[in-house]
Image (tube, rainbow, N blue to C red):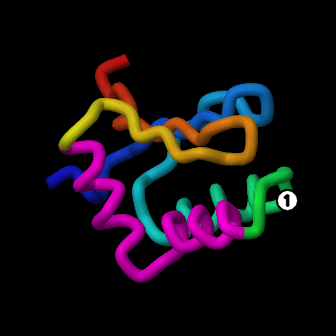
């Protein structure tokens, strides 16, 4: 499992690609940087739970095992999460 590896996070039009170690603190910081963006109340709740809930890290690892990029809706944008290319 790559749970302690780096992830690449991008919000096109809001934040350039950035690399973080996949842990609860990084997910909290990602949430703090996007929680003020326009989105529905329901989407706000779902995204907050997805990034800061008790199983957030495990769920992201599971999702990245299924697909190379995890795209989470964020209003009229999306958060794109993928494994960081540590070779480059």
Circle 1 residue: 36
Residue 51 percent across, percent down from the top left = 53, 65
Is residue 22 rendered to the left or right of residue 47? Answer: left
- The image shows residue 65 at horizontal and vertical percentages of 19, 44
Location of residue 73 (image quadrant): top right
Image quadrant in which you'd find residue 32: bottom right
Residue 48's x, y, as percent? 61, 69
Pick the residue in front: 6 or 56. Answer: 56
* Quadrant location of the N terminus in the rendered image: bottom left
Q: Magenta region: which residues?
A: 42-65
Q: Which residue lies furthest to the top in this view?
A: 88
Q: Is mark 1 on a helix, strand or loop?
A: loop
- Residue at the (41%, 40%) spot, across then down: 70
Task: Choose between 76 and 52: the one closer to the eye.
Answer: 76
In the picture, residue 42 is in which quadrant? bottom right
Extreme bottom residue here? 54
- Check the image and report above or below for 47 versus 66: below
Seen from the viewer's position, the closer of residues 20 and 38 is 38
Rendered view: 82 above or below 35: above
Q: Is residue 69 left or right of residue 87?
A: right
């Amino acid at each position: 499992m790559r749970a302690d590896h780096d992830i690449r996070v991008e919000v096109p039009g809001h934040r350039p690609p950035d690399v973080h170690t996949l842990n609860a603190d990084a997910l909290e910081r990602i949430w703090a940087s996007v929680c003020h963006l326009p989105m529905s109340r329901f989407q706000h709740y779902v995204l907050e739970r997805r990034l800061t809930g008790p199983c957030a890290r495990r769920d992201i690892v599971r999702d990245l095992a299924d697909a190379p990029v995890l795209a989470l809706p964020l209003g009229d944008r999306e958060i794109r999460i993928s494994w960081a290319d540590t070779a480059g």
